[in-house]
Amino acid sequence: MAAARAEPAANGPDRTAIAIEALDRLKGMDLGANPRLKAAVMNVLASTRGTPDFVKIVQDFNLKDQNAGLLEVAMKNPGAESGVQAMHLILAGQGQGLVEQALQGADIAAAAKTAEALGNTGDKQIVPLLLPLVTDARRDLALRKQAVRSLAQIQDGAAALLKLAGEDKLPGDLKFTAGAELNRVRWPDLKAGAARLLPLPQGRNTEPLPPLADLLAMKGDPQKGALVFARQEVGCINCHRVNDKGVDFGPALSEIGTKLGKDALYEAILDPSAGIAFGYEAWDIELKSGDAAFGLIVSETIDELTLKDAKAIPTRIKKSDITSRRQLKTSIMPAGLQQTMSTQDLADLVEYLSTLKKAVK
C-alpha cells in the first residue's frame, strides 16, 4: 500500500513530498524482494535528483550506482550536511574514479566545489585525490588553493603538505595558503612544524600577524584605510591608481573590491608574488653598456621594447642594445608591506580596498 502511495511522485512537488514521507517509513527494506516498491523508490529518486532528499533516499535504501547523482549534490552543497554526506557515500561506494574525473575536468568551478566537499568529509581517502593537484602547475591556482585548504583539514593531508614544504617541493604560489592553514591545525606536532617551515608573515616590530581567519574577523574602517593607502611609507599610492589618484605602474585598483574578496586582498598584500597579474610581470634587462633596466614591458616591436619603471616613466630600448632579459618570478610589489603598518591599519586598508567596486549603472 505504501509503495502505491509513493508512485505518483513525479507529478508535482506536493506529491513528491508525500512520496518521500511514505518512503521514510519503509527505509531499509529489501527492494530486490519488492519490484513495485523498487519502481516507486526509483521514481522518487529521479524527481529529487540534485537535492538533499536524493542523498537521503540513496542512503535509506542502500542504493548502488548513484555516484553521479550524489556528486551533483556534493558540488551544489559542498559545505552543507547533504553535500558532505553525498561525498561520504561516494567514497564508501568506491566512486573515487568519478571524483578524480571531476577534479581533473575543464570545469574549474565544479572541480573546486568537489575539492571543498572532499575536505569537509574528514576522510583520509581524499589525500591521494587532492595531493597531485597541489604540485600540478598546469592547473588553475584557485583549485590548487582549495586542494590545500581541504588537505589541511585531514591529519594525513596536513602532514603531506608539511612534507612537501620540508622537501622544498611546495610551490611558491601556495606557500601563503598552506602557511595560513597549517599554522592553525589542531595537531600540535604539525602546527609546530608549520611555524618552523611556513611561518606566518611578520607585522610591525617583527610581531607575527594573526592567522588569516583572525584577520578576516577583524572590523576595518574604510576611511582610515584610505589614509593608510595614501601614506608614503606604506607606498600603495606610489604604484597604484584609484580613480584619478596615484601612479599608473601596478594594476589599477578602482574596482578591486569587485574582483577580489577580502581573503584574496589579504593574500595579495601579504604574499604579492603568489599571483602576479598578467601583463605585470617584472623584467630585468642587461644592456651592452653595462647598465641594467627594471620594470614592466608595456609594448614591444621587432626592433625595440618599451619598459615602464616604478615611477611609471616609459623608456624605449633598442633590442640591439640588449644582452639579456629575464622575467622575474617575484612581484613588482615589494614583500613585507605589512611591516610598515599595524595589524589594525592592515585591516583598515583591506576594508577600504573591498569598498572599491564597479559602479552600478
Image (cartoon, helix red, strand yellow):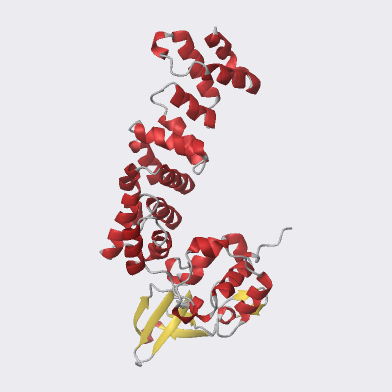
- Which residue is nearer to you in this view: 40 or 322? 40
Instruction: For residue 293, say whether it is visible.
Output: yes
Q: Position of residue 291 (x, y in %)?
A: 38, 91
Residue extending furthest bottom? 289
Q: Position of residue 228 (x, y in %)?
A: 61, 78
Drawn side of residue 262 relative to residue 284, left or right = right
Q: Position of residue 280 (x, y in %)?
A: 48, 72
- How many numbered discs sit on the rendered protein? 0
| Residue depicted at x 42% and y 69% | 200
Residue extending furthest left? 167
- Look at the picture and state if 35 lies above or below 67: above
Instruction: For residue 71, say whether it is visible.
Output: no
- Which residue is nearer to you in this view: 329 or 315? 329
Q: Position of residue 110 (x, y in %)?
A: 47, 44
Instruction: Locate the N terminus by quadrant.
Output: top right
- Look at the picture and state if 227 lies above or below 142: below
| Residue depicted at x 40% and y 57% | 185
Residue extending furthest top? 1
- Look at the picture and state if 339 lies above or below 163: below
- Look at the picture and state if 286 lies above or below 187: below
